[in-house]
Image (spheres, rainbow, N blue to C red):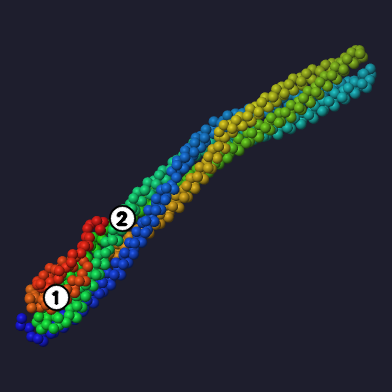
Amino acid sequence: MGLSAEATVSETTAASGEGARISQRLESARQVVESRFLEAGDVLSRAVDGVSALIAGLDSMSGNLDAATVSSTTADLARAAESLKSLPDSLGARRERVSELVKFGDRLGACIEEMRQHLAYLRVFAINIKITSGGIAAAGPEFAIFAQEIYDCIDMGRTQLDAFAGELAGLDHTLRGALTHEHELARDCVALLPAVPDALTASAGAIAEHHTKIAQVAQSVASLARDVQKKVGSGLAALQIGDITRQRIEHVQAGLQYLDESAEIAALDAEPRVRAHAFVHRLLGAQLVATAEDFHRDVTRIGQNVIGMAADATELLRLRDLASGQTDGKETNFLRNLEGNVGQALELVGDMTAGEQAAEDVSRSAAVSARDLSERIAGIQNIRADVQMMALNTTLKCSRIGETGKPLGVIAIELRQHAIHLEKSAAHTTSALEGLFNAAEALGQREAAQEGEDGKAAAAANVLTDAVTRIGKAGDGVETALTAVARQGAEVVDMLRRASQRFDFHKQIGSVLDAAANQLLDMAGDDAIETGDIAGALRPLTDKLAKQYTMAQEREVHRALTEGLGEGAVEVEAEAAVVEDDDLLF
């Protein structure tokens, strides 16, 4: 080769300086590899932990989602709804009985008026006896005394009757108030039934369906999370391409340093030394080319798969929609709807329960009033007997005084007749009181029997209260767990998205490797390099390089380029090759 000594020295010096600049550029790429791959690895490691926590939360939630409770509670609500629908029947029967009590009260009112009229006649006759006897000398004062006694007895009867009428008015007011309440309940039933129980059943069914959907989504998301967990784990293992690239960069940097420090090469003459530098540059350039190719290929595959994992993980956000009560893009709040429907149902049930209590109170009050009124009627009947006895005595006395006593006798007979009419009215009143008492007793017995059998309104109220409490408790537990796992899922998605953004290494690392490899190959030139006379000077450097290699591909590249060095060529020990299987990169 026709190069002057000055030219070869200049070329060697220039090559040494260019090699230093390449080494510096590689150092910056190595630092980026070390920091960014470490950061991406940390994100993926935390993603693995996050997915593990998510899976544990989903498994726990699925285990704690008491489907049996939801199912049994839904069935209870359905039964309560049916009980509500049957309320109008019992309400109608009770209304008829209360109406019957009111009718008995009306009959008693008519009886009172009859007795009041008869007592008024009796009072008139008593006054007539007193006046007429005053004009009969033979009658003496005895008739006036009898007349006054009759008058006083009739006046006592009027007092008893007025008290009777007052008590009956109070009872009538109570009965009519109860009947008005019953009619209002009937209107409420018409307005709220069957809409309220139907809405109650629908809400309960919606909650059961919602919980079933949560369980299904939780199961599918857990399966998806396990798949993502495997992929993230594989991606984490595949990040060793960063460590491999870092080591191979360091080996190239070491080769450039060895070249500068090689006493054997430095001792060569100028032209052989240039060829030795060119050989080493070609060897190191080939190593960088292989490194860059592997780096581009693996980083591209890892990046695509991590982006795919992030896309898969977004399915985890379905949990967030469920946690916020959204289904198919529509916001729902099943528990709030149920509570509203139960509130209406409980209000109706409360009115019905109050109606049952009122009916029981009315029946008790009516029965007591009937007994009290019967005693007053007995008093009036006693007065009637006294009046008849006095009238009979008056008749007997009139017969003794002869013809002058006949007018008094006629009045006495009329007195006895009206006393008989009073007796009949009292008998009618007694009959009506017996009917009132029996109807009141029947109403009270019916309410007691109804309460003993199924409780109707009260039983429905208990079922509704217990059911909404149980569903509320179950709903709170599920929603709390759902919110927690939804938050974990969102964190996992965020971590995977950030991890995918950290795999854009082509520009920061890959391009540097490409440029450095091209520079080394340009420095080596395209011509064949004669190594026969410089093999001895190259062997110490190539042997030293071979001993630091840790990757099989490095050895292959080294062997392919150093075989021409003859007997001194390094025999590379066989080591386990790095697995480059698609399974590693998922």
Toward the viewer: 500 or 256?
256
Residue found at the far bottom of this picture:
6
Q: Is residue 245 left or right of residue 49?
A: left
Q: Position of residue 346 (x, y in %)?
A: 54, 41
Q: Is residue 330 visible?
A: no
Examine the rendered structure and indicate whether residue 290 appears above or below residue 318: below
Q: Position of residue 302 (x, y in %)?
A: 26, 61
According to the picture, the residue beneath numbered tag 2 turns out to be 230
Toward the viewer: 129 or 210?
210
Residue found at the far left of this picture:
2
Residue appearing at x 85%, y 27% in the figure: 152
Q: Quadrant of residue 517?
A: bottom left
Q: Position of residue 461 (x, y in %)?
A: 55, 40
Q: Amino acid at mark 2?
A: Lys
Q: Is residue 485 visible?
A: yes
According to the picture, the residue beneath numbered tag 1 turns out to be 539
Residue appearing at x 67%, y 24% in the figure: 435
Q: Which element carries disc 1, helix, strand or loop? A: helix
